[in-house]
Every structure is written in structure tokens, then in C-alpha cells.
Image (cartoon, rainbow, N blue to C red):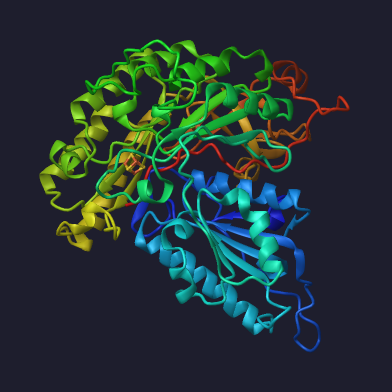
Amino acid sequence: MKTPHSTGMTAIEQGDLNPSDSDAGSAKDTSEEVTQAEDIVLPVLDIHGAPITPRDKNKYFIKTYGCQMNVADSERMASLLSEKGMKPARGVEEAGLILINGCTVREKAVHKAVSTLGRYYHQLKDQGMTGPGDKPIIGIGGCVGQLEKEALFKQAPYLDFVFGTDTIDHLPEIVYRVEQGEKHIVFADFDRTQSYTTETKVLGLKAQAFVNIMKGCDKFCTYCIVPFTRGREKSRTIEEVLNDLARMSASGVREITLLGQNVNSFGKGNPNTANRAPVDLKNQIGKVGPRAGDENFPQLLHAIDADPRLGNIRRIRFTSSHPLDFSDELIDAYSTVKKLAPQLHLPVQSGSNRVLQKMGRHHKIEGYIAQMDLLRAQNPLVGLSTDLIVGFPGETEEDFQATLTLLDRVQYDNIFAFAYSPRPGTRAAKLDDDVSVKEKNDRLNRLLQHQLKISEARSQLLVGSEMEILVEGESKKQTLVEKGEGKGRVWTGRTGCMRIVHFADDSGRNLVGRFLRVKILAATALSMKAELIHDAMEAERYDVLPTTASGAPVKYGALQGSAMPVSEVIA
Ligand code: SF4
């Protein structure tokens, strides 16, 4: 399990809402991907039992729940605090500033964030660290802060401040105000301006980075709270994104994940649209995606591919998407944009048109399947994943069977599946939640078991093939070596199609952040075993590492598995 101690890099921890909650599941082994926090490290005690681990007011600890948007936001918070001169704490027990970046996608998620706060507070109380001058500053942000605002002070009076998704950049100022003695600050206004402009902040040397290109959602699916916590869709301009990426490429970033609630509608209404000719976008759903005349997402992908300043960036991923805005032009981009990874996470939520209509998804299953068929016709090995909700109000066994049929038809590589639970404040919460918990869990299990067989079969297609991977770090399981099936250290990397690959290397090199070619030897539904194709010399030639200002190759710390597909929503 990854802890701040094992990475030695950061105090950002990702909580465990997705996909390991009891009512959620993935047919994929996420143990290599989702960092589950071990955030309370027992303090070292002196002979009288008093803690001797010093609490440092210049150290921060951030606990993150939820999706990749929240993970990216936490990285931004960490960067802003570092610019203020603060350092990451090794654990919550030595932090002078404790932040929770919470998720609201389910009611349970809100409870989880607040109960984590309570746990921290009781630990502080046990240490006698709750008095004036002793207590660390405590804040809560993200979607929880945006939605709950001052109501959180009732539940946690010891909280010092609440901030929202649009006010992250004010964090240093808010912390300063608390240091000056202000209490119960709420900084959670939505940014009501039309444009969206930002600069990506990456903490330290990273080979992978998230880049927000748009924010908000205009879709209003009936079960989802996101449009209320992240606001309406707004996009950056292509020019601004490219300049941002040029800076990141120069710092050694190799793989980017373009982020947004619905990246396919990138460009809508951004300030660069005024003089553009109308574009007739089509898709298999039968609707036009982004509005005519806007900059659009495929144009952004082509621009990234062509920009000579972005030489270090070899791979582009994106998440998340809505089928309604998934245009034929974007499907074409999979064969024309060289850097675009052969992978797509396109949430569908149900295989039944009746349920899709109740969910307010505005698309039919036939159009979605046509999109998947077009993509697989271009590249049969493209990695496909999706989100599914089981037990939505009114879902019958017949509807559920339609979802199983969809799995057979599309042959996903992986799914993220969730048992429905109502989220207060959404339209679906007013529907009769008439599928029993037992039935929901049963359907969830059947769905995951069904997908496991498909994932296994899809993996087997890759055995014997040669693939490129980006090395993310040393494997937590040194099983190849333990079984005598390799020498040296076992590393973990990821293919363009998002498969986890383990391989052994006895050269003693640090391989993190390197693109390498491997031959796949064996595969399960969850991961693959491989061998390196090239020796150390060939590997150097295959992928020349970016260099620092002094001309030395960049040395990356372990990556965070940041490129995993994010679930569009946890119902
Ligand atoms: S589920 Fe996705 S598309 Fe639907 S409202 Fe939520 S964020 Fe938007």
C-alpha cells in the first residue's frame, strides 16, 4: 500500500471511495492504482507517553476522496501551498494544516469526509492538540465544500474553513486569514464568468500529469449531483492549453490525461469561437456535439499532436466523456492523432433504453454500440471501459439482462460498476428506490463476474504481442522473482490500452517514467506478465529521457497510477 512514507514525495492521499466501496466494484485489479490512505501514523511516544513527533505549522496533509478531478485539485492545492513555503507532512500527525478534499457524488461520500475529520479531531484531542495555539488549521474543500458550505461547521465546529471547487487558488489567502485569527471562513462562490482559464500545477518531477481542459457539466443526468457542485460547462482555449503543455513538456512530463466532466464538449462557448466557421459535427447518436463554430476536442488533440514544443509528451489520454458529444470526428482522431492512446472510457450506465431514459442520459443503446463498433473497426485492440449503475429505480431483471447483453456485445476490457443509491438533491432521489439492497448487490456481483470472463478473454488476445508501456514504478508484488521467473526487480507499467504489465529487470536501473517495449508472456483478467524486449543500451536508444536544465536525465519518483480511467459518477 502506498503511503506518504513509501513515496517520500507527497502528502496527497487518495481516499477509498472509488471503486472499493462496498456498493461499488470494478472487474479490474485496482490494487496497483488506487492509493488507499494509511494516513494516521501512530506518533512516536516518549517514556511518559507524550508524542515526540513534532507538529510543524509549515507542513500540510491533504486527504482526497473521489475522482481524478479531485486528485488533480489536490495536486493543485499542494502546489499552491508549496509556493507559500509549506512542505508535505509525512502523515496527518505532523501536519500544521489538514485538508480534506471531499466528494459528494453519493451521500455516503459526504459522511465519509466528515467522519474522517472527526477521526482526525479525536486523534488531536488524545494528543492534547486541540487548544489555542496547539490545534492545526483544519479545512474542507472540493465538491463537499461547494455543496455543504457553512452547514459543515454544525457537524464539525472545530473546522476553520470551507472552500469550493472554484476557489482552490485562494487557498494560501484563506490559510493566511485563519493564521491571523479569522474563524469559520467560507470561500465557496462559483466563478460566474464565461471563460475558464487556469495554469496546471504539477508538484515536483512527474512523468504523468492531469490537465484540466474544461469544467462543469450541462447534462443533468437525473442521478448526478455534479452539475450542482461543478457548475456549467466552460472550456479553456486551445492556445492556452498548448502553452500550458509546452511548459509541462519542458519539465519532463511524458503522458497527459486531459480532464473534464465531459471533455468531448470541450470548446463550447470559449472566447476563441467568434470568428470560426461553423463545423457540422456528427455522431452515431444522431445529434450534433459541440455547437457549430466552437473550437472542439478533436481539434485540440490534433493541435497537441502537431505542436513541436511538446516533444517530451508521448501519450495523450482523456476522461470523462458523454456519448452524446462523442463525435465521428473524434473516432477518426484515434487513427490520425499519433499520440492518442488506444483507449476510451465512455460511460454508458445501463444497457436498457428504458432505464437510460429514466436516467436522463439522452441517448439510446443502439447509437452507443455504433460508436463502439466504429472504434473497434479501426483498432480491434483499443481498450474500452465504461461505468454502469445497477438497481436504478424501476430497473427490472429484463433491464439488467440488457446490460449483460451489452457487455457481451461491446466486449469491454474493464468496467466500473455501482449499486444505485439515491443522492439527495437530484431528480432521481424523488423516484421510488424500489430495487432491494439484496437485489442490487446480487446484480452487481453477477455483472462483475460476467465481466471478469470478458476481461480475461480480452487479455488473452494480447499474449505473444509486443507492446509499449510507460513504467509507473516498482511492483508491490515481487512475485515474478519470488517464483524464480525473472531476475532483479519487478516493475509495473501500463500499456496505451490501459493494461497493467509486470516485468522483471536486473539492470539495477531506475525505470520510472520510461517508455519501453515488452513482450506479453501471460495474462489474467487483471494484469499481464511480460519480458523486456530490449537490453539496457537499446532501451536508452528507444526512449531518450527528457533532461534537466543541467543536461542530466530527469529522475522521476514513483508515479501515482494517475492515468487510470475515472468513473464518471458513483451513484
Ligand atoms: S453523470 Fe456525467 S454527464 Fe451526467 S450529469 Fe453527471 S457529470 Fe454530467
Residue 40 appears in the rendering:
no
Name the residue rendered at 62%, 58% in the picture: 62
Q: How many marks?
A: 0
The percent coordinates of residue 131 (x first, y second) are 68, 83
Residue 210, x across and y down, in percent: 57, 36
Ligand 1: quadrant of the figure: top left
Image quadrant in which you'd find residue 203: top right
* Residue furthest right as drawn: 550
Task: Classify the position of the N terminus by image quarter.
Answer: bottom right
Q: Is residue 489 above or below residue 43?
A: above
Q: Position of residue 349 (x, y in %)?
A: 27, 41
Residue 176 or residue 199, whichever sits in front: 176
Q: Does residue 223 appear left or right of residue 536 in this picture?
A: left
Residue at image coords 67%, 40%: 202
Residue 108, given in percent of the width and then of the height, sits at 37, 63
Q: Camera-side residue: 134 or 235?
A: 235
Snapshot quadrant of residue 161 = bottom right
Indicate whether 379 appears above or below 551: above
- Please tell me which residue lies in front, 189 or 496: 189
Q: Is residue 422 visible?
A: yes
Name the residue at the bottom extreme: 48
Q: On the rendered structure, is 109 left or right of 157?
A: left
